Image (spheres, rainbow, N blue to C red):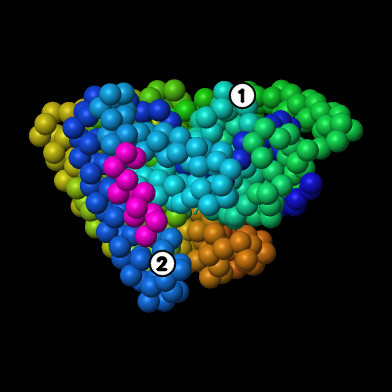
């Protein structure tokens, strides 16, 4: 069985698959020391779920009729089943586990019990149990953790994965991703590239044809996955993987060498990272700095905002590991596809045009200040630059500066050591491009975010897989914009980098060098490939 998809991250892999069924939730074992809180959380989730189901039954009766509405009545009955509910409470108190884990375990047990029954009526009820468990987990305000509970390395096959779910996956266990939905420009795809794991999205496989434990080949060079490959195919893939390893060795020989053309033209190659753990990959690939730390991922896959101390430790650690090398930390850029319940973002018609990036921070200065305090404190320990996302107006920079001044005053008063780092803005909206001459007066550097710049300039949702071909970084409008920004910034003596995914496009490296781009910041695995490209140039 062979399926084609879009390549979110190039690479080859071969191994067993782990299939996450649609809506399947794996909850890792979680212990608690606070049984009472877990019991109250469960009570609330049960109440909320029951109310939802009563509403759903009513709505279904009015719209799709009694027979369909009875499905939701059956779901209510499961929630009212005394034995089922008592068993969950019992698990929390006797095994000291979180409510989520108790619900998940109980759900799994009953699901499999129903499934194994001979009577087809009961077999069908298994799906109902799953649905009820899913609702309960959602109402426990905890995003279900889709995490494969496998000890061995697996190719993860899923319907879709949100950035938040990606962050909870232990990448050490993953060989590759095969995702039925998704788009190559989504943050999920970016995370796969960050992890440097072969990834295919938009793969139209059928769940009925695959199951966990089956073997597969992921050829994310040609864009295909083969389930149950033949012996010959496996031998061929083994040899391809071997050749790939040799190529990688050649690249590794470029470590410690300069990124300079044959005629002496230079460009710096930095790495993009999204977690503290990826600093190792940046160093391993000899990145000349960190051009983008997407700090928002520190805020994801959790249930409350990280504290100042927590953030300070992470930033300090990254700076210390990078030594004298530059580290650019972007302030919280949430909204659109990057969200968590606790951010309490209101539902918006067009979230990509709503409360995103700097807008969120300026609307919630108390949260922004915590991050700025942590950054200024950490700045003492290395070569930090702060980068502000989603800028559209010079007044936003004035507002940021005002908040920063308040933070400086507070730190001074409290006699806490700090250093004010260089500050730059992301150029990722057409407005920022057009006023780049004005912005250049107010900041120390620019970093062009081509992912969003492409989406906002071409009016194409970066997540909409239907329009992937229209989401085109090669569009003359984008290249002209980049050229314009560099011209305006250089007039004022300010450097310009590109940190969007276009920076890693080997076909454009020469053009970027000719335009005068100072820094290209790419996923760690691309650093040496770009260095090779530059060193091969005249
Ligand atoms: C960009 O928009 O190009 C960028 C680097 O930011 P993100 O992909 O995180 O939105
Ligand atoms: Mg962006």
Identify the residue position indicated by label 1 in the image. Answer: 152
Determine whether, in the image, residue 81 is placed left or right of residue 373.
right
Res 349 visible? yes
User: Measuring 24% from the left and 35% from the top, which residue is drawn there?
Assistant: 38
Q: Find residue 69 and name its label.
A: 2
Label 2 neighbour load within 10 Å: few <14, some 14-19, many 20+? many
Q: Nearer the viewer, residue 139 or 362?
A: 139
Give the main secondary structure of the magenta stretch: helix
CA–CA distance between discs 2 and 1?
A: 43 Å
Query: Cβ of disc 1 within 8 Å of ligand 1?
Result: no
Dot 1 crowding, Cα within 10 Å, few <14, some 14–19, many 20+? few
Q: Is residue 412 left or right of residue 208?
A: left
Q: Which segment did they paint magenta? A: 73-84
Left or right of 261 on screen, residue 310 = left
**Coordinates of residue 382 in the picture (x, y in percent):** 37, 27
Work out whether mark 2 precedes mark 1 in sequence or the reverse, and give the earlier one. 2
Q: Tell me the residue at 24%/24% (across/down).
A: 33
């Amino acid at each position: 069985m062979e399926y084609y998809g879009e390549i979110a991250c190039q690479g080859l892999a071969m191994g067993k698959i782990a299939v996450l069924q649609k809506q399947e939730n794996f909850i890792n074992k979680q212990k608690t020391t606070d049984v009472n809180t877990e019991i109250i959380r469960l009570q609330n989730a049960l109440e909320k779920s029951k109310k939802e189901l009563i509403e759903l039954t009513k709505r279904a009766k009015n719209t799709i009729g009694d027979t369909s509405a009875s499905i939701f009545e059956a779901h209510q009955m499961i929630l009212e089943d005394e034995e089922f509910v008592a068993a969950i409470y019992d698990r929390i108190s006797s095994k000291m586990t979180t409510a989520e884990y108790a619900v998940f375990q109980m759900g799994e047990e009953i699901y499999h019990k129903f499934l194994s029954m001979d009577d087809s009526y009961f077999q069908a009820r298994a799906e109902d149990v799953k649905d009820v468990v899913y609702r309960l987990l959602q109402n426990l305000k905890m995003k279900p953790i889709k995490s494969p509970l496998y000890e061995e390395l697996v190719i993860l096959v899923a319907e879709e994965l949100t950035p938040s779910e990606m962050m909870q996956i232990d990448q050490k266990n993953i060989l590759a991703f095969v995702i039925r939905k998704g788009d190559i420009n989504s943050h999920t795809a970016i995370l796969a590239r960050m992890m440097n794991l072969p990834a295919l999205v938009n793969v139209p496989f059928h769940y009925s044809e695959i199951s966990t434990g089956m073997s597969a080949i992921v050829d994310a060079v040609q864009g295909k996955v083969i389930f149950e490959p033949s012996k010959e195919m496996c031998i061929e893939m083994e040899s391809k993987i071997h050749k790939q390893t040799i190529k990688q060795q050649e690249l590794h020989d470029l470590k410690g060498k300069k990124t300079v053309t044959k005629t002496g033209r230079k460009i710096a190659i930095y790495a993009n990272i999204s977690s503290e753990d990826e600093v190792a990959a940046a160093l391993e690939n000899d990145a000349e700095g960190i051009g983008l730390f997407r700090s928002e991922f520190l805020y994801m896959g959790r249930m409350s905002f990280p504290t100042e101390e927590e953030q300070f430790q992470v930033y300090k650690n990254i700076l210390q590991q990078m030594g004298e090398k530059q580290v650019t930390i972007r302030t919280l850029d949430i909204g659109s596809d990057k969200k968590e319940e606790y951010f309490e973002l209101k539902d918006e018609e067009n979230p990509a045009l709503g409360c995103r990036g700097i807008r969120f921070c300026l609307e919630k200065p108390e949260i922004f200040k915590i991050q700025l305090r942590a950054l200024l404190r950490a700045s003492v320990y290395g070569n930090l630059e702060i980068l502000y996302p989603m800028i559209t107006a010079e007044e936003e920079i004035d507002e940021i500066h005002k908040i920063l001044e308040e933070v400086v005053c507070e730190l001074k008063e409290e006699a806490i050591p700090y250093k004010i780092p260089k500050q730059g803005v992301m150029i990722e909206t057409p407005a920022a491009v057009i006023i780049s001459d004005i912005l250049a007066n107010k900041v120390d550097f620019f970093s062009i975010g081509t992912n969003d710049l492409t989406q906002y300039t071409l009016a194409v949702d970066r997540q909409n897989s239907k329009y992937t071909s229209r989401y085109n970084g090669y569009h003359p409008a984008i290249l002209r914009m980049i050229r314009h920004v560099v011209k305006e910034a250089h007039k004022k003596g300010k450097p310009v980098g590109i940190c969007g995914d276009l920076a890693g496009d080997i076909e454009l490296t020469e053009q970027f060098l000719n335009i005068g781009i100072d820094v290209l910041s790419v996923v760690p695995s691309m650093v040496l490939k770009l260095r090779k490209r530059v060193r091969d140039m005249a």
